[in-house]
Amino acid sequence: MAQDRFIDIAGARIRYRVEGTGPAVLLVHGLGAFIESWAWTIAGLRDRYTVVAFDFPGFGFSDPVPTAFAPEGAAAFLLSFMDALRIRSAAFIGSSLGGAIAAMAAGRVPGRCSALILSAPAGFAPRVPAATRLATLPLVGEVCVAAIRRAPVLGVRSALVRRTHLPPVLVETARRAFTQGAAGASCLRIVRATVGLRGIRPEVIARVRTAAERVTAPTLLIWGTRDRVVPVDQAAAVARVIRHARTHLMPGAGHAPFIENADAFNAVVREFLSRVSEPVGVGVGW
């Protein structure tokens, strides 16, 4: 795997990696995740694409950027990251919260996104796990973060169906991110800004949908039928917003098919990208 690189954006030190050659594919992870979450996707695409993955501000080992904790600010940061690396346009692959961010960025400046792949994107419907809703309460959220710091397998397991033999790289990176980085505080800040006891706040959903309605790039939704985090029935809500989107269901997969069902996920992604206009615009900034 390629070595870590760092770049300063908005006064923050951002960790990223670049692997492969060819058109640009930009990976946007979800809440509490990090570059290593995409290890299997990078390995599956780098023979044909220049794959760029980064730790979103406040996660993994990137510094926080206060404006990036709000939906619009997060989308703006994604575009700023592309500017910093001189990527004119790319295919976006976003997971969970990263799916909402990728969709908002693609809708905000359509010319920057040549294809959009969303793996169980959050933010289009209110339903979230009970633990996420409870974390909005004073002290409860802090207890949840402390539990993950002590036992990082808890955070990794929530996204998977097969919860034995967890990939060691994910457990170890989660441990480091939650004990050495700002991941815990960042998770709480985002959850408490976007979620209430009834789920994702209506005003947040409205902002995500409004931006996503302007997406013009070919779009593919990928959803595991056993997703416990963002249930598969939310695919219909996304399809009502991005009306030209195709939906691909992965039977038996959970919230992170790009980890548990990597070969099948990569095959679907490669087939989709091969049928759309090739992403262009990889710069020389790295």
Image (cartoon, rainbow, N blue to C red):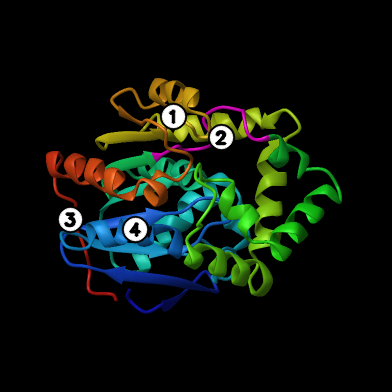
| Residue 215 located within the stretch drawn in magenta | no
Q: Earlier in the sequence, mark 4 or mark 3?
A: 4
Whole-number angstrom distance, CA of label 4 to CA of label 3: 23 Å
Q: Residue at x 46, y 53 (%)?
A: 29
| Rendered location of residue 274, percent (x, y) | 13, 44
Residues in magenta, as a range: 119-129
Q: Is residue 125 magenta?
A: yes
Mark 3 sits on what residue?
280
Whether label 4 touches label 3, CB < 8 Å: no
| Secondary element at tag 4 | helix
Q: Is residue 44 left or right of residue 104?
A: left
Image quadrant where residue 48 sits: bottom left
Q: Are marks 2 and 1 in contact (CB under 8 Å)?
A: no
Residue placed under numbered mark 4 in the picture? 40
Quick check: 88 left or right of 105? left
Q: Residue 225: which numbered mark, if any?
A: 1
Mark 4: amino acid: Trp
